Amino acid sequence: MALIVHKYGGTSMGSTERIRNVAKRVAKWVRAGHQMVVVPSAMSGETNRLLGLARELQPAATTSELLRELDMIASTGEQVSVGLLAIALQAEGVPAVSYTGWQVPISTDASYTKARIQHIDDSRVRADLDAGKVVVITGFQGADAQGHVTTLGRGGSDTSAVAIAAALKAAECLIYTDVDGVYTTDPRIVADARRLSTVSFEEMLEMASLGSKVLQIRSVEFAGKYRVPLRVLSSFTPWDIDIDEESRSGTLITFEEDENMEQAVVSGIAFNRDEAKISLLGVTDKPGIAHLILGPVAEANIDVDVIIQNVSHDGKTDFSFTVHRNEFARTMDLLKTRVLPQVGASGLVGDDRICKVSIVGIGMRSHVGVASRMFSVLSNEGINIQMITTSEIKTSVVIDEKYMELAVRALHKAFELDQPPARTEGAAAGIGSQAS
Amino acid sequence: MALIVHKYGGTSMGSTERIRNVAKRVAKWVRAGHQMVVVPSAMSGETNRLLGLARELQPAATTSELLRELDMIASTGEQVSVGLLAIALQAEGVPAVSYTGWQVPISTDASYTKARIQHIDDSRVRADLDAGKVVVITGFQGADAQGHVTTLGRGGSDTSAVAIAAALKAAECLIYTDVDGVYTTDPRIVADARRLSTVSFEEMLEMASLGSKVLQIRSVEFAGKYRVPLRVLSSFTPWDIDIDEESRSGTLITFEEDENMEQAVVSGIAFNRDEAKISLLGVTDKPGIAHLILGPVAEANIDVDVIIQNVSHDGKTDFSFTVHRNEFARTMDLLKTRVLPQVGASGLVGDDRICKVSIVGIGMRSHVGVASRMFSVLSNEGINIQMITTSEIKTSVVIDEKYMELAVRALHKAFELDQPPARTEGAAAGIGSQAS
């Protein structure tokens, strides 16, 4: 018997028929002897419908008072879901009770629409589990110290599930979603992309921050902080799939770095074309120049991703950075009107036809030459690298957007990601098989 | 400056456009110098939609666990409403904050789907009012001592509004609804039915229990218990109607019995055709007979309204009562199979083509002969009275259904309800006119 947390996305909760299937799947886990906590999202489309009503009344979210009301409204989507799922479980003959974030309680800070979980009191949930009930808890939300309802931001239900699993010291947190795991890269780009049976927490963190949409990055951070074993798996398998098979499916995010795992140097290729590149040429290289350029950008609430400043020649340097493509025009304007007059650059060039391609692998730590192999692969394909940025376990390059698919496919093949790795699959042993 | 509670029904909250109009109306009251608390219902259709989803998963509400989840789900309708109305008020430039029942908190017992309010903590609301905010509070709901969400049952938002007004010692509670007040009788039956500018609490209580749908009976009981001045008025007037005019419109439910009020002997004619009559003839008149007949009916959860037992002749009596027409067949079956064998009646007759017509008036206390005048009016129209039941301020008769309209019109005219009463309109002085 183990304590397991399941998280189901909005698509899985999209109709009463689907909710009934979720209930049947959870009931199967209960009958296998597990204590179950379930965190469902709002029914698909519901959060958008609710926020749409609010926008009809006030198009621009400007004040803390307004954000508070948005949370009051948006949080009801999950509240309906937990009630419906508890009813569906009861209809399956499984005792079940639902709780909102404030009932658990899940305590957060007071940052409406993007609150952070501070503490989860597990006593109420544990008492119900010990009484043989499935506990269904709203994702995406909590309450601040004054009892105001808060939400965690889009995708926050993943974070709720992981945080609840951490508080309850659950054996595993299973995230049921519309993909069946984490892939070496996007199968829509590379046909022979392979599902990873395990991926390290740090790799997952890089992939999430590089644009993989499988898991919300804060849920991965939370899993890392509290070492919650996390599995991403498909909600589209039949509910009555063999539980041992189900509990070994998908991708397990692990924390143990065993010898087998070390053998895969690169685990995946991430990419995104959401960014635009901006360069200030011939900037006088003096202390504080980076702040002089990026300070006004930050003040305008524009996020900067890659930042490159090269060594200077004759006291001049080129300063480049990327922003989200939607912010490109606004950033260029800002630089022209507020920054260029201050820094005296010889030129300002922008390019919104770029993409970022990254190789991610925990094995890069112990294998030299991985980055240079990446550069050589791209060079052989005639792809010019515009920017490079590295971390301990990833190397990212900015290239012309039109080469994106070519680069991803070439790298996927060169690092043999289409081949099963030499490591064993031991780390992916499922929870279901441990049932009493 | 006065503290005023407004309650708006689901139709008034039916779209963002209508919510904006509610906000404009409330803003007008704020600008007139009042402290405002607003209790909106769920957007029209929303509660039915939510409970419909639950019914798809479990058609029959059977257990306390299931009723708890229904409350969890249904309560979200009002939570969305308060958030939207607070946003609409903010968009009008009026500071506003919304609270759910558990946030106030409004404490109830644990009777899910039909909970009763036990206590309202006014400190949080009062602090916001003193800070110059409009406080928008969910109707229909509260939380029990364990923090489970409870609802008050259909129409419960009226009760919430009155209870909140009582807790805050509000100067007046205004119930905005789809009729413009309480009438001498249903204008669809009697064309010259007249809106009452005032009606006493006790008359309103009789009218609500006799079938008038204007106010939920529990809200009237609450108003009586805490002496909350209650006004029923139309939500269909333009939001920018003159506030003095608005605050004198509708019907004020009063507690002072001034001389003027005494002059109207009968205030209204109520009626309903939801009942059926059942008589056991020639029952042996012995102690416990009433319980022998009605005990099994109560056990079957069938509500009994009028009960008549006449004096006996030769140790035999006739015993008659009415039930809701929907329960007629079931009650007849029950009597045949379980009661007749026990009581040895000489006959069992039922009639579901009846109606109940009542005259209501606080003046009946001090005026003799009102009931007999009612009987004489009906007799002059050739209407046979089948049953009679009286209370201190009302007399009800059961007659053949086909005479209902005739009886109501004849009584309305005979008691001169089409004429303005001699009493002055002083008691209906509005709140708006007292603004600073």
Image (tube, coloured by chain):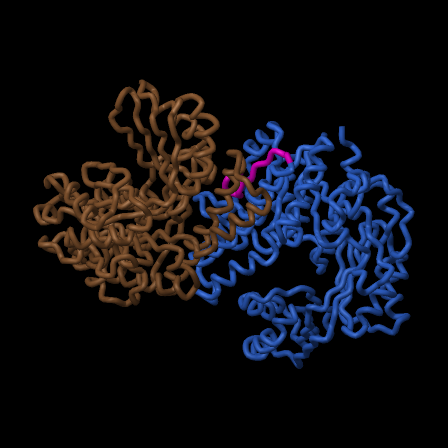
Chain colours: A brown, B blue
Residue B172 at least partly seen: yes
Q: Residue at x 41, y 54 (%)?
A: A82
Instruction: Give the position of the N terminus of chain B as an image quadrant.
Output: top right
Left or right of residue B313, residue B61 in this image: left
Q: Residue at 35% x, 55% y: name it.
A: A8
Q: Residue at x 10, y 39 (%)?
A: A368
Q: Is residue A310 left or right of residue A301?
A: left
Tell me the quarter of the picture where residue B287 sits: bottom right
Q: What is the x, y in percent for residue B85?
A: 60, 43
The span shown in magenta is B93-105
What secondary structure prevails in the magenta region? loop
For the residue pair A419 and B411, the one nearer the viewer reads as: A419
Which residue does the image show at 56% across and 49% down from the upper left? A53
Of the pair B252 and A11, the residue shown nearer to us = A11
Q: Nearer the viewer, residue A316 or A229?
A: A316
State the count of labels. 0
Whole-percent x and y of residue B106? 54, 41
Residue B98 magenta-highlighted: yes
| In the rendered image, the vertical position of residue B186 relative to residue A109, given as above or below | below
Please indicate whether residue B87 sits to the left or right of residue B259 in the image.
left
Residue A51 position within the rendered picture, expressed as x and y whole percent measured from the top left: 51, 48
Residue A125 in sight in this render = no
Quadrant in which the C terminus of chain B appears: top right
Residue B167, quarter of the rendered image = top right
Residues A360 and B231: in front is A360
- Residue A168 falls inside the magenta stretch: no
Q: Residue furthest bottom?
A: B346
The location of residue A283, given as percent across then percent down, is 34, 24
